[in-house]
Image (cartoon, rainbow, N blue to C red):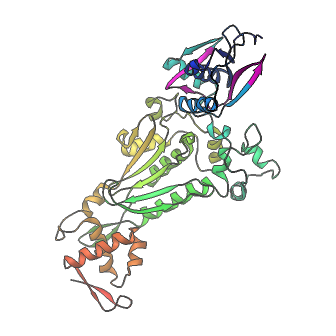
Amino acid sequence: MNLGIESEILEFKKSTSELTEGIISLSAMLNKHNEGTVYFGVKNNGDVVGQKDLNENTLRDISRKIAEGIKPQIIPSISLELIDDKTIIKVYAKGNNVPYSAFGKYYSRSFDEDRSLSPEMLKSLINREGEPDYIINKVSSNQNLTFKKLKELYLLNDIKINNDKFEENLGLFTNDNKYNYMAELLADKNDISIKVVTFAGKDKSVMLKRTEYGGKCLLLSVNNVLEYMESINETKVKVGGLQRIEEDYFDFNSFKEAWLNACVHTKWSEEIPPAVYIYDDRIEIVSNGGLPSALSKEDFFAGVSKPVNKKLLKIFSDLNYIDQTGHGIPLILKNYGKEAFYISEHTIIVSIPLNKKLLESAYTKNNYDDLNNSEITVLSLLKDKNNYTTGDLIRITNYSEPYINKIIRSLKDKKYIERVGANKNGHWKIL
């Protein structure tokens, strides 16, 4: 029997000895038409010859090789078909997450040929319909989702909603009418982890505190982080000679723009949420995926917007979380310059420096040249109120309990403080 001729969505391979070539063809067809079929056990002219040496591991080996070779990963349909008493293998795949690579390279289909893509052709492929909207096309692993909080946000912004069509109107379904990954991000409950981590010093060697804001509607988590960082900016103090002077630690508007951009424009295809890291000298906002494929660094710094998640951006915009004027990056550039940005193929990190004058004052030695900044801060607090408990110090400084205990021991060992009376009803004496 003859199966016809090869096409832009159909490829024949004589046997699985050509498995690598078949996988390349499959990726090329996905890039050109979002679907494709490869038969093993069929000659190039369409004649069925059958797949030899079939065993119980053959289909499993094909599946494993496809998983290793094609990125982003696909889940193909692999089956056996019997034609004229000859067994052939059919591999069918469908996917919209273009571009797909095969063994690290990109291909597209031209009739029955697989053509390697140059960087320019790859950009053209990606830009046919803009950056692929992964969170719209991927089916959520949880189909029991509710959106009470999201509806409340729309109503609080005086935006009328249609309860019956609410989820459909926002684009929370795939083409198969299942909740997509964006729905999971915006649901009342989810497994998305949003973290703010504080470190002691200027690197990640010692973690002081990790605060978790995930597990709920992404919009609420985003806002929780903003509120937390704003409270830090309001309550941080400059300490010089133990005199408390209220002063901002960083430009909150710059942080807000960087954080919202990270949440909206991160490539959720990596399924790694953006995060905030706080060090002694800076705040880092980390997003994954790098720049959109069609956006150069020059365009990025000029404030040109190429959204990765278009529908998510629209929801953020509808609810006044973000605007689309592109002023966020220029604002950060104005305040901190290009050195505030680290851009690689897979990551964007925005570093918001803490107030240099404040830090220099905090680290001023004076008569406390044997104390670090954290010890001076705690000493200042105890001078102002000598009955602060360990719990009070943890709450005010945001340091972890082990770190506070370490500071207390150090201050006692260096003869700056001593405990008077019992732990419960006593107080600290400044020496």
Task: Answer yes or no: is residue 319 visible.
Answer: no
Name, please, the residue furthest toward the right. Answer: 164
Compared to residue 131, the image places residue 155 above or below, namely below
Is 71 placed left or right of 233 in the picture? right
Residue 296 image offset from top left, x and y in percent: 46, 28
Instruction: Indicate whether residue 335 is drawn in magenta.
Output: no
Q: Depth check: give the residue in front, 321 or 426.
A: 426
Compared to residue 71, the image places residue 139 above or below, namely below
User: Residue, x 63% and y 55% (percent of image)?
Assistant: 190
User: Residue, x 65% and y 51% (percent of image)?
Assistant: 186
Residue 382 image offset from top left, x and y in percent: 31, 79
Is 329 placed left or right of 24 in the picture? left
Task: Answer yes or no: is residue 270 visible.
Answer: yes
Name, please, the residue furthest toward the top. Answer: 45
Magenta-highlighted residues: 81-109
Instruction: Indicate whether residue 90 is drawn in magenta.
Output: yes
Compared to residue 45, the image places residue 10 above or below, namely below
Residue 211 image offset from top left, x and y in percent: 48, 62
Is 335 placed left or right of 25 in the picture? left
Q: Depth check: give the residue in front, 133 or 24.
A: 24
Magenta stretch, overall SS: strand
Is 418 placed left or right of 330 in the picture? left
Q: Quadrant of the C terminus?
A: bottom left
Q: Quadrant of residue 81 in the image? A: top right
